[in-house]
Image (tube, rainbow, N blue to C red):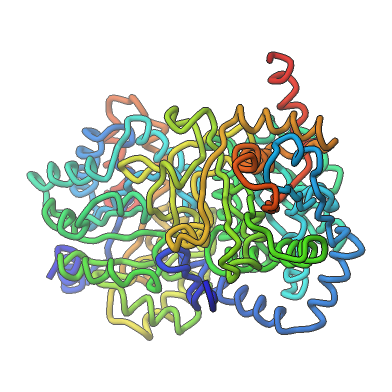
Amino acid sequence: MTRIQSKFHELKQAGRKAFIPYLTAGDPDLATTAKLILSLAENGADIIELGVPFSDPMADGLVIQRASERALRHQVSVRDCLDLVKQVRLHSQVPIVLFSYLNPLLSLKALGQALREVGVDGVLATDLVPEEAGDYLAEMREANVDTIFLVAPTSPDARLKRVADCCTGFIYAVSRTGVTGVRQSLSQSANHLVHRVRRFTELPIAVGFGISTPEQVAAVWQHADAAVVGSRIVAEIENLEGHEHLVERIGALTRSLVGKP
Amino acid sequence: MENYHLPDEGGHFGIYGGRFVPETLMHPLDELTKAYDAAQRDPEFHTQLQHLLTTYVGRPTPLMFAAALTRHLGGARIYLKREDLCHTGAHKINNAIGQALLAKRMGKQRIIAETGAGQHGVASATVCALLGLECIVYMGTEDMRRQELNVFRMRLLGAQVVGVDAGSRTLKDAINEALRDWVTNVETTYYLLGSALGPHPYPAMVRDFQAVIGREARQQILAVEGRLPDLLIACVGGGSNAIGLFYEFIGADEVRMLGVEAGGRGLQSGDHAARFSGGKLGVLQGTRSYVLQDDNGQIALTHSISAGLDYSAVGPEHAYLRDAERVAYTSANDDEALAAFQLLAKLEGIIPALESEHAIAEVIKTAPHMAPDKIIVVNLSGRGDKDVNTVMPLVMNQ
């Protein structure tokens, strides 16, 4: 079992749902990202989605685009992200999923092995779909790294099945059509999608894109196994750039999102 | 190359092409592919398209013997395929009309497009005005500055031009923004992509709509010369005008083909858009091809005097044709393009687009080394009115 699979198993035994926050590696800098990961883990994160910055993040809204730009201002690479995970692993066993686009990931030779060695547990490339994933899947299976793919409200049943068959660890359901970013209200299409996906898989289902409040997290947990919050946290990191209590403040935000006192 | 039938069902040209998009777009791309296939089999669609190409675009465009340029260079006989005479001033409208008709068939009223030089944006805005469709054009703010006139033209035509202030503020960034719009509004919106790029079916569909250039050129050269040309030359940004000219001739092995990329300030400088010289295999904006990038897989910024060639990736079919050694690729730098701009204006009375001037720059290098009985057909993909503002200070400083 990977750390991700163990985590969902453990949560299920405890009758709990998972909280998955997203951070862009290197925003505002790599040392702070390491501290943020540990803080998130201590304050209610069950799994961390670690964004590898890319120059052309076509699936991301403005908040995460700007985070990528900030990270790329000091040339944060995939290798840096792996070094970061290696550092974190000295202190924490929190499951970590790399979240990026295919092109930066492909810059690493023997990607699967490299992820495995530093303790990355899963990987999601937003612009990779099962049709193009043959070699990638084989490589990740070989390295025992979970492969997470997106399903969307626009995916017909045949695609849901095809995507589910390629996933290990969990499936990531996009709450609504669109890019990442905070939304006022959680769309009904998310619940509907979760129920449709359930017919094709036993895997845990995470819902993300546009979830930003404790109420929305709780609402996602009614139907799905995990809630992903990205832009809300990244926006707070942006607002607090240079603030001496940045890490504590993000920890507090995490607690409030999961409904902890 | 005989029996050339690419792409395959998944949109692959060998190892290139395919679909690299967020899942949200996969089903819409399947639907687009189906709608396009159905349209292609429907004689009514072809009748509509042909009618507009004839009565609105002004096709067929002439194939003109460039007598003065031929005399000046003292080598091969040079013919210009005059896409600059298309309505709106460039080949881009061939594709824009085809896709806009398709959008109407699919019941989509909202059209989005990206543009670099502004020619595709103007073509899209024009066709949307004609067909009564809403049109939103994404354009990098650097390109808006360089192509101010085209921005104004689009707005006159009723389109909304949205400036994109990210990255290099050029074509690549405009495509990102158009993709973000599409993924958000996919139910109601048709993405009218302007070059032979992006996820399947775009590279094949854009090629097919542009292939009218080569079909006409073939008939026209046979009519005047009684044989096929020895060499075809076209500039390559994304590669739609080039594949449009080349496609008809892929099976005719005696016809050599040459694509010309933007050499910018020179290949050594790093400030260029010559993907085949400085790029490597990568995935950008939905397709796998040659991409200018750094060692960490971050997309490199490009430079060219011509906004239309200023793009980090090349259409996947070009990458395939290069590997197959069916088409050769070279580059011309800013200065060479500028010199060609002035030469063609003086000798032939034609002010071509800076993009097309990269092809003419290659003609200037190649034609003198070819025998006078050889024939070159060069795609003059657009006219240069839009570039006069860019060129004026450069020429005055010479």
Residue B250 as seen in the image, left or right of residue A258: right
Which image quadrant: the C terminus of chain B? top right
Q: Residue B265, relative to residue A86: is it above or below?
A: above
Which quarter of the figure has residue A246?
Answer: top left
Q: Residue A82, relative to residue B246: is it above or below?
A: above
Q: Which residue is pictured at 44% across the width and 48% down the height? A: B291
Residue farthest toward the top in the current orientation of the protein? B397
Q: Residue A169, relative to residue A64: is it above or below?
A: below
Q: Nearer the viewer, residue B196 or B85?
A: B85
Residue A69 as seen in the image, left or right of residue B79: left
Count of marks placed on residues? 0
Q: Nearer the viewer, residue A193 or B396?
A: B396
- Which percent across, then down, holds residue B183? 56, 60
- Which percent across, then down, holds residue A97? 25, 57
Residue farthest toward the right in the current orientation of the protein? B55
Q: Nearer the viewer, residue A211 or B365?
A: B365
- Which percent across, then down, holds residue B103? 73, 69
Q: Is residue A85 visible?
A: yes
Which quarter of the figure has residue B306?
Answer: top right
- Which percent across, then down, holds residue B252? 60, 69
Q: Residue A221, relative to residue B339: is it above or below?
A: below
Residue B367 as seen in the image, left or right of residue A44: right
Q: Which residue is pictured at 34% across the width and 77% down the height? A: A164
Q: Which residue is pictured at 24% across the width and 52% down the height? A: A44
Q: Is residue B216 visible?
A: no
